[in-house]
Image (spheres, rainbow, N blue to C red):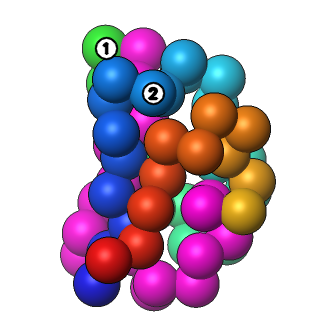
Amino acid sequence: MPAKVDVEKCTGCETCVGDCPNEAISMASEKAVVDDEACIDCGVCVDSCPEEAITME
């Protein structure tokens, strides 16, 4: 399952954007957005998010 972003917790710091090895995360309206097609379910973004706003289901 692709990573999911809790937009209530996301502060728009963009840490996950730079850390994603597959460039599957972008920003929209100052929040992180995961491209489900590009996400390889590696979990790097979950570990790198300082706000714990990204989860894997």
In the structure shown, which secondary structural element does the residue marked by tag 1 occupy? loop
The vertical placement of 56 against 48, above or below, is below
- Between 2 and 6, the one nearer to me in the picture: 6
In the rendered picture of this protein, how many numbered marks are placed on residues? 2
Query: Mark 1 belongs to which amino acid?
Result: Ser
Closer to the chain start, of discs 1 and 2, is: 2
Which residue has dot 2 on it?
A: 9
Quarter holding residue 50? top right
Q: Which percent across, then down, holds residue 22?
A: 56, 72
Q: Indicate yes or no whether the magenta region holds residue 36.
A: yes
Q: Residues within 10 Å of mark 2 (few under 14, many from 20)?
A: few
CA distance for labels 1 and 2: 14 Å
Q: Nearer the viewer, residue 52 or 39?
A: 52
Residue placed under numbered mark 1 in the picture = 29
Residue 47, position as x, y percentages in the image: 72, 62
Residue 20 included in the magenta stretch of the image: no
Q: Which quarter of the figure has residue 46?
A: bottom right
Task: Work out whether 28 lies above or below 20.
Answer: above
Q: From what the image shows, is residue 34 above or below residue 37?
A: above
- For residue 28, above or below residue 46: above
Which numbered tag is attached to residue 47? none
In the figure, residue 1 lies in which quadrant?
bottom left
* Placement of the C terminus among the 4 image quadrants: bottom left
> Which one is closest to the eye, mark 1 or mark 2?
2
Q: Amino acid at mark 2?
A: Lys
Magenta range is: 30-46
